[in-house]
Image (spheres, coloured by chain):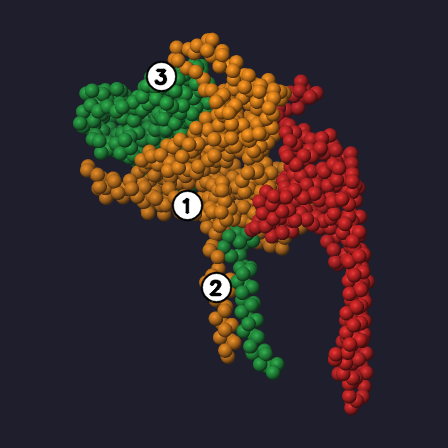
Amino acid sequence: MRLFWVGFFIFWPAVAVIACYIAPGMNWWFPGEAGSPIGRQIDDLFYMILWIVTAVFIAVQAVMGYVLWRASATDNKRAFFSHGNHHLEVIWTIVPAGILLFIALYQMDVWAHYRIQSQYPTEAAKAPIAEVTARQFEWRIRYPQPDTKLEIKPQKHDLYAVNELFVPAGRPVMIYLRTEDVQHSFFIPRLRIKQDAVPGQVIPVWFEATKPGEYELLCAELCGWGHYKMKARVIALPEEEYYAMIEKLEQAQSFDGVPAEADDSNADE
Amino acid sequence: MRHLAVLLLTLPLAGCGAFSPPEAEFVLRAQTEELDSKVRTAVAKEMDETFGTPHALVAWLKLPVDYGGYAGVTRTSKLAGKIKSLSVRFEDDQLAKFTEAFADKSGNYSFPDAGLQLTWLSGPLSGTAIPVIGYNPEKRELALDEAIEPHPPADTPFVLQAGETLKYGRRLYMTHCMHCHGASGDGAGPTAKYLNPLPRDYRLGQFKFKSTRTDQKTSREDLKRIILNGIPGTYMPSFLLLKEDESHAIVEYIRWLGMRGELENSVVINELRLDFSKDAIKQRSSEEGSETSDEINESVSEVIGQLPEFFDSYGDDMAELWAAADEEDSLIVPAVARIEDSLESRVRGRRFFLEKCATCHGHTGRGDGQMTIDFQKNTEDPAGGLYPIPGLHDIWGHQVKPRNLMQGVFRGGRRPIDLYYRLYGGITASKMPAFNTAEPELLWDTVNYVLHIPYETPADKAAYKTEDDKYEAELKAAPPTAEGATPPTGEATTTGNETP
Amino acid sequence: MSNRLLVTSLPLCALAVCLCVWMSGCDQGIGGGAYSDVSVKVRSATLETTADDGAGTSTTTTDQTATGSGPGTFSGRVVFDTGAISFPPLIAQGQDVKDKQVCSAEAVPNEKLVVDSSGGIANVFIFLDAAPKGYKPEKEELEPILFDQKNCYFRPHALVLRAGQPIRIINSDPVAHNANIQVKRSQGFSQTVNSSDTTGVVTSFAKSEKLPARVTCEFHNWMEAHILVADHPFAVVTAADGSFEIPNLPSGTHTFRVWHEAASDPLERGLKVTVKPGESTTMELKYGRAKFSKL
């Protein structure tokens, strides 16, 4: 019995160490590898906290195992009773407080970069690429006409799309997020971006997709019975392809139903 | 002992017990329910045989629906003996589909464990199905699980996995669409009552936003576009992430549900309601010079005997219309390319708008025209009364609001061609008429004007005002024709109450 | 101690399990469950006719029994039992309505029920439900019928159109109209006819209708007319004095419908008329106010 309980308390820290060690490689904790620099920073913060917690957990388990081993060694020795020990109380208050303070200070940069508007990447903040309007149960997207700036108020030549957001890859981009009805949440798991859309507000959100590809966009706020189907895709494209795609969108949007060959007279416009 | 009792008491509460949700069923239209009970039962039976139930669908080959599966015919006819392999011939497109679904890279076919269902479409075994467990591409032979007898003659048509697309469509429909549009496509699913506008009731076979000419049905392409893009301004969300085969299956299932309701409706409305509704039967037997109950019974059994013929002939008519909608020449193609958007074009378009559209859409396009406050005749009311609420009503009997064009939200799409479709083809199901007699240039002018309504600038308004004045002056200079007519004027509202 | 705990917690656990099962819907294809088992049966496109079917034995699918030979005529008059009756105009001259310069330049008559001084009812449809058995339509080129919109009402107010016969819808008014012909068997027709368009729009309906279809104008909600599409020539509308004549009827007993727009049910569902070769069967059909419930 003695061996069992000591082994029991030693076994779990061992599992924890192994799990922590192989977790990043196995992609256990995250929905895929972070697709953006800020996403990697956020992951790093997570891992840092994970390591701190693991270290504390192992330490506590080790002490437990030791105490069990020692206390059960001699049957008739009375245990030391430490309840109300002032020094111990001070130690285990100050140490966690210090750790928390460290975490709070350490993550401030990332947080500011991620959420504080004055810290947004200037290029992205200057030229928001689209307005994303959440609606039960879809994402409606409005791009500015190529070579114009996105205005909060819809403009005549804006381009419209639904459930498919094109972004240029490899640089930060900013969107305006709003909602037409209830509260939704703009969540691109791979890019580690999650921002609530609040009725009546236009919220600037920036993110970056390092590599071209397709990213899932979900609603992360229970918004009604159709919440589960409120899915869209974000498609990151190399810069030129992105502009070509917007051009294509513009052409599709101004389609007048006349087959191309018959439309030559107007094609120059 | 006690906890065992508790356990037993809670079991009936579980899903398998008394509180399980109701079975999905295809409901009949209200007009069918109003028929004499014998006729109603006969219609219900005929509907079941023609379309089945949500659990046992019927793929009626008369309808232009892609039910799925792989069609082929037998090649040889063996006259005697039991056989376990069947020489067959597939058309190229069917074979390609079949190969893509079941063959691996080296050309070996492998089927699911239960095999594929082969359904005979005619011949001695017509209607029966047998499992197929393999296919030999060299010999072009299907391996059967059990021997069949008699062997069908050559060129007997069959389908493998008949109704696969219909089944798939049903599954997707039940997942994504049913809660609003209802299991029967009656637009009365569990969530429908919370929505405004109400979800579409497919059972008249009519849809609003189509690219086909005014006298045509909706094409597959139109339905797909609506499913993928959703309808802004309503609760219909976009299902853009559906895969190609998924949206195809849903479109086919929706068309099938539409045809189901439409056929029921046309048989009941045209052939049965007049003489065989409960009221009609009551009248026929109560009026002076009335028919005897024997006479009525005889006519009832006669009409019941005719039901299969009605379903057949009305089915033919309907199938023709639905098939025609996907023909190339049903699509509206403007005779001229879009007129370039300019102030002059918009001024011309606005004149057209004031003459033709303002009655419903209002002089400034706010959707507040005169027709929205007039009471309209109820076309479905046998007593010929008015609708209880003012405004326009669609063929489903619901009030429809002419679009407020100030909002720049266009339900059927916002491309210029989408607006052209609406103008040229109208919206048959609601009260929007087709303007296909107007000059195409003028329609493009109107499209330009309508697209610009939300973005009118003071300069535009000044130009419109000038044109109004000029128009008035011309009218005064050249007095109207003998009829004493002056065309409708829009100046009163266009200059007075613009929002800044 | 631990035994007691087990005793009390087991029913709770059972309850929780059952609740879960209940909420998850038992996972066996309940109701409209998208994943429940579905079978598909194939139904042939052609109708399988069975000999013992009721329709097979009955020779009179539509009540007409043709006996004898040679055609006859059915004629007569439809009258209002209390004699003449008149209604004030639908729109008085100068009344403030839409497009009043045109529409109330003259009064728009109320044509819901038109009874002349001698009591004859106009615009009553008298028609066979279906072509008589054995009737073969002659191949004839059907002349287009003119349907006008003038002074904001339809002219004529009631007309019979043969299936496939062209109808030319014109507009003599200097304002646009929109004829919406609500046929049930063909796809409906709703099209704007431009102001003063005397060439108009030509259309036709391939399928016969059971009852006259209502025609309305989307722009002027008082405008109304009725068009019956028939696939045989045995359908007429009574003249202004209520008289009608249906010639060339195969001899035998026919069942006519008599229909008027102001009556919510047909005036006659099945009027039995026996036609003898070469003779004319005459009838006076008299109806009272009570029949015209839509007035």
Tell me which corner region of the image, top left, top right, bottom left or bottom right, holds residue C109: top left
Chain coloured red: A
Extreme residue in the top direction: B477
**In the displayed structure, does residue A197 sit left or right of residue B429?**
right
Dot 1 crowding, Cα within 10 Å, few <14, some 14–19, many 20+: some
Label 2 marks a residue whose chain is B
User: How far apart are the alpha carbons under marks 1 and 2?
Assistant: 27 Å
- In the drawing, what numbered circle is on residue C105? 3
Q: Nearer the viewer, residue C63 or B378?
A: B378
Quadrant of image for the N terminus of chain A: bottom right
| Amino acid at dot 1 | Leu
> Which residue is the site of mark 2?
B17
The reply to whether dot 3 and dot 2 touch (C-beta < 8 Å) is no
| Amino acid at dot 3 | Ala
The reply to whether dot 3 and dot 1 touch (C-beta < 8 Å) is no
Q: Looking at the image, is mark 3 or mark 1 nearer the viewer?
A: 3
Tell me which corner region of the image, top left, top right, bottom left or bottom right, holds residue B210: top right
Identify the residue at horizontal 69%, vertical 21% (top origin): A269
Marker count (numbered): 3
User: How far apart are the alpha carbons under marks 3 and 1?
Assistant: 49 Å
Label 1 marks a residue whose chain is B
Q: Nearer the viewer, residue B387 or B269?
A: B387
Q: Earlier in the sequence, mark 1 or mark 2?
A: 2
Asked whether the viewer can see residue B88, the reply is no
User: How far apart are the alpha carbons under marks 3 and 2?
Assistant: 72 Å
Evaluate whether label 1 is on the same chain as label 2: yes
Q: Colour of chain B?
A: orange
Indicate the secondary structure of the residue bearing disc 2. loop
Residue A187 percent location from the top left of the image: 68, 49
